Image (cartoon, grey):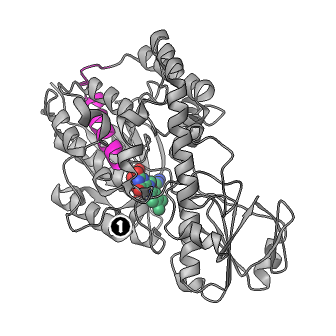
């Protein structure tokens, strides 16, 4: 018998909505606390830069119980994703659970001695209240606290009329018109903004990044949607995963020449298609060594603009400002009116007390989360959306379904605290030693191991069908409708009392 809980979901982005749906549909009372004035998280209109669209194809960026509208393009725009999320929230009554303009400022174990947490909530007008919850789902994402970069000479640059802004604040393309724009960063946001600045009539556009990285075009070879090549189980199986035995290791060793040829072939294709030699943008790193959540999609137009000089590429970083000039770490001097810092976001759960932070995050920044969802030393607490990937909505949906069962003691394979600790240690060893690329973003990234991660979640949940067999199982990308069926095949229950 499962008793209903009062659950606080922190954050109303993709993950918060998934968590609210999973807990409420099992009979729990849910309050979603969101500090912003609207739902959507990174897709909230005020936070989106112009021309933003998903990197994931639409059938990979959806919940198991709601497809994106047929009328949407393969890669939906920011406003379309926001409309999809708003519609999802309305359809399942999640909008009625929302408390907007309310920030979680702190949390502590409940003073009344009952299991759960007391959250310190701060409303927009500054009023603070404390509220008790039986369980808390942290769904605050990885893209909320913009990183800062301050270089010597910044005050002088600003005083003579220069502008410095984080990429999340590049909301008005007229900012670029007729001006010299310098974008710092190599992510998709950086290349999107550089291309947008050219299209918006900037006088000069420069992109500054540490080194060239592999970028994946929407259509590989100009023909095949990248999901059909890079998101499939057969491709994932080219990477040795965690916890494998001696026989599997031997198998990987024997297959090494074929796997090597597979990656060199892909690199050759990308070099030819994107004209990387002409752009002087051939990455030094082997493509397979860097596959994780940070592999960007190539913004259409980016490489052609680099090739014909509309975007100038500089390798390095900002060193200092001198008047209206930015001096780079390699000594290059670039005149600038606007500096856009596409340097990402700080990871963290700042409202968690220090003692618990230490249980959650190791000194090297690696997160201690079983299945990237729960920590045995942080009771009545779970994390949704911390298993990020190239199909984050599906990841959040499956994590939310796992978490509610974990919280209710209803996983078919409910782990003991010791099993969780042992597994966390094994995963940390994998990320630190065996595949350092898996350690990016605090280790909170399942790419390229989507299927492996989903298989584990399905097995824990007790889904009778856990994966698709045959060619579809090996050569098709994750299918949200199939995961809906797998979830439905697990034993069902309802909280009551
Ligand atoms: C431009 C862009 C494009 C992307 N495209 C893709 C893509 O194509 N495919 C893909 O898989 N992923 C993509 N991502 C990654 C994206 O972050 C995830 O897909 C997903 O949207 C994350 O959702 P989330 O709910 O976990 O986090 P968020 O969307 O960041 O939502 C977290 C919410 O928590 C709220 N919050 C934070 N702290 C507090 C607090 N203390 N109190 C109250 N509320 C709080 C925030 O205001 C926010 O609304 C993209 C990201 C960006 C920035």
Residue shown at 19%/33% (left/top)? 486
The residue carrying pointer 1 sits among few (fewer than 14), some (14 to 19) or many (20 or more) residues within 10 Å by Cα, namely some
Residue lying furthest top in this view? 246
Tell which of 363 and 195 is nearer to you.
195
| Residue 89 sits above or below residue 354 on the image | below
Counting from the top left corner in percent of width and height, residue 373 is at 40, 34
The range drawn in magenta is 392-414
Residue 194 found in image quarter: bottom right
Exactly how many numbered labels are in the figure? 1
Is 76 left or right of 334, judged from the image as shown? Answer: left
Residue 242 in sight in this render: yes
Q: Nearer the viewer, residue 393 or 331?
A: 331
List the residue tagged with mark 1: 38
The quadrant of the picture showing ligand 1 is: bottom left
Mark 1 beta carbon near ligand 1 (under 8 Å): no
Q: Residue at x 30, y 20 (%)?
A: 414
Q: Position of residue 263 (x, y in %)?
A: 53, 39
Percent position (x, y) of residue 161?
Answer: 74, 85
The C terminus lies in quadrant: top left
**Viewer can see residue 103:** no
Q: Say above or below: 375 vs 215.
A: above
Q: Secondary structure at mark 1?
A: loop
- Above or below, 420 against 439 in this view is above
Residue 394 sits in which quadrant?
top left
The answer to whether residue 241 is magenta is no
Q: Residue at x 47, y 17 (%)?
A: 251
Does the magenta-highlighted stretch encompass residue 406? yes
Q: Quadrant of residue 207?
A: bottom right
Taking the image as shown, residue 217 lies to the left or right of residue 158, namely left
**Which part of the image, by quadrant, shows the N terminus?**
top left
Q: Main secondary structure of the magenta part?
A: helix
Say if 403 sits above or below 55 in the image.
above
């Amino acid at each position: 018998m499962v008793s209903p809980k009062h659950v606080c979901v922190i954050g109303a982005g993709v993950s918060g909505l998934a968590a609210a749906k999973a807990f409420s549909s099992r009979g729990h009372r849910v309050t979603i606390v969101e500090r912003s004035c609207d739902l959507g998280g990174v897709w909230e209109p005020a936070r989106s830069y112009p021309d933003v669209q998903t990197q994931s194809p639409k059938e990979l960026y959806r919940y198991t119980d709601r497809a994106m509208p047929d009328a949407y393009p393969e890669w939906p725009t920011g406003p379309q994703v926001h409309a999809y999320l708003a519609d999802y929230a309305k359809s399942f009554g999640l909008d009625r659970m929302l408390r907007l303009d309310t920030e979680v400022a702190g949390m502590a174990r409940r003073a009344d001695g009952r299991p759960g947490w007391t959250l310190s909530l701060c409303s927009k007008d500054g009023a603070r209240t404390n509220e008790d919850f039986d369980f808390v789902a942290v769904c605050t994402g990885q893209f909320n606290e913009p990183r800062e970069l301050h270089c010597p000479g910044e005050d002088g640059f600003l005083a003579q009329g220069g502008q410095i802004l984080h990429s999340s604040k590049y909301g008005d393309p007229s900012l670029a018109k007729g001006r010299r724009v310098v974008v710092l960063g190599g992510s998709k946001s950086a290349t999107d903004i550089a291309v947008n600045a050219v299209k918006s009539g900037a006088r000069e556009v420069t992109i500054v990044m540490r080194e060239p990285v592999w970028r994946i075009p929407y259509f590989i070879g100009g023909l095949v949607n990248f999901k059909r090549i890079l998101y499939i189980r057969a491709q994932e199986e080219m990477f040795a995963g965690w916890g494998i035995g001696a026989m599997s290791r031997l198998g990987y060793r024997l297959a090494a020449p074929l796997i090597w040829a597979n990656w060199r072939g892909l690199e050759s294709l990308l070099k030819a298609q994107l004209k990387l030699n002409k752009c002087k943008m051939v990455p030094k790193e082997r493509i397979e060594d860097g596959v994780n959540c940070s592999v960007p999609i190539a913004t259409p137009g980016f490489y052609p603009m680099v090739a014909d000089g509309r975007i100038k590429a500089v390798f390095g970083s900002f060193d200092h400002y001198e008047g209206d000039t930015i001096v780079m770490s390699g000594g290059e001097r670039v005149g600038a009116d606007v500096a856009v810092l596409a340097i990402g976001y700080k990871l963290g759960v700042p409202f968690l007390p220090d003692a618990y932070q230490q249980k959650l995050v190791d000194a090297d920044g690696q997160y201690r989360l079983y299945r990237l969802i729960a920590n045995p030393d942080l009771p009545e607490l779970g994390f949704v959306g911390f298993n990020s990937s190239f199909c984050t909505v599906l990841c959040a949906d499956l994590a939310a379904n796992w978490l509610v069962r974990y919280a209710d003691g209803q996983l078919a394979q409910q782990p003991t605290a010791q099993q969780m600790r042992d597994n966390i240690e094994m995963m940390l060893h994998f990320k630190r030693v065996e595949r350092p690329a898996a350690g990016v973003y605090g280790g909170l990234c399942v790419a390229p191991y989507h299927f492996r991660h989903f298989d584990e979640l399905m097995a824990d949940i007790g889904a009778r069908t856990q994966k698709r067999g045959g060619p579809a199982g090996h050569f098709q990308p994750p299918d949200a409708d199939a995961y809906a069926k797998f979830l439905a095949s697990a034993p069902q229950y309802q909280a009551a009392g």
